Amino acid sequence: MKDAALALIDIGANLTHESFRPDFDAVLERARAHGVDQVVVTGASAGSSRAAHALAQAHPGFLHATAGVHPHHAHEYDDATDELLRQLVATPEVKAVGETGLDYYRNYSPHAAQVAAFERQLAIALDCGKPLFLHQRDAHADFLACLDAVRGRIARAVVHCFTGERAELVDYLDRDCYIGITGWICDERRGQHLRELVRLVPADRLMIETDAPYLLPRDLHPKPSHRRNEPMYLAHVCAAVAAARGETIEQTAASTRANSRAFFTL
């Protein structure tokens, strides 16, 4: 089966990144040619959330958006940011609140600021009824504490770019979270464990993403001359996930597509 027949959905691509400016239209064309039907453009700051919304408006039906503040930018979160996010999530182009969560690995924002920004975005999700697009790294206990405070009242949540260990995965699945898998699974150095763990994810809780321009799959052949990831490589991620789960590419494509459409109401 050709990539173009797969009808894939990339649930997380940072298409507002400056690296896409020179050839943005070509990036979209390549994505379509490799079977990507829809892309959810990640909002990770006030500026990128505004830009993601604009891209979704300019490419209706193909591009959609999230609106949120990544924990790296949590120290920038203020009342004006909160109001902007509330305005954006009220639009039909924005399908989820986030990228939000906690990241104690980089610590670009103090822990207290991260928790405060996360809690304010959880409140936005409660108010608007849209799902959550979540990030967590080295902050599992605090992350769960924040989530558990609103458990049962949020619409849906996906832990995007999951790279953690079994215990973390079980905690997320116990809370009915969806799991987003990236090209990290293609990394023989750091992602080997994901090939085992991805089998534990129920078929109705799994989604796939590129996190472009980050996380270019390491096992691409031939390797591109640059290190920029883009949505066209989602078919490669899909194939890796399918192989790890013992499914056909078509099965994984179909289930992740159905999950993504239902989750984001595409």
Image (spheres, grey):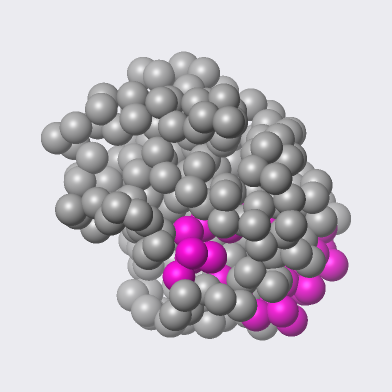
* Residue 20 as seen in the image, left or right of residue 54: left
| Residue at figure coordinates x 50%, y 42% from the top left | 235
* Residue 214 as seen in the image, left or right of residue 176: left
Q: Is residue 156 magenta?
A: no
Tell me the quarter of the picture where residue 198 sits.
bottom right
Q: Residue furthest left?
A: 22
Q: Nearer the viewer, residue 156 or 34?
A: 34
Q: Is residue 142 above or below residue 5?
A: below
Q: Picture coordinates of residue 52 (x, y %)?
A: 38, 35
* Residue 21 as seen in the image, left or right of residue 241: left
| Residue at figure coordinates x 30%, y 33% from the top left | 27
Q: Picture coordinates of residue 21 (x, y %)?
A: 18, 36
Tell me the quarter of the picture where residue 28 sits.
top left
| Residue at figure coordinates x 48%, y 44% from the top left | 234
Q: Is residue 166 magenta?
A: yes
Q: Nearer the viewer, residue 176 or 87?
A: 176
Q: Is residue 104 above or below residue 265?
A: below
Image quarter (top left, top right, bottom left or bottom right) of the C terminus: top right
Q: Picture coordinates of residue 18 (x, y %)?
A: 20, 45
Q: Picture coordinates of residue 108 (x, y %)?
A: 33, 75
Whether residue 13 is visible, yes or no, is no
Q: Which residues are magenta?
A: 163-187
Tell me the quarter of the picture where residue 134 sits.
bottom right
Q: Is residue 51 above or below residue 45?
A: above
Whether residue 73 is visible, yes or no, is yes
| Residue at figure coordinates x 37%, y 50% from the top left | 212
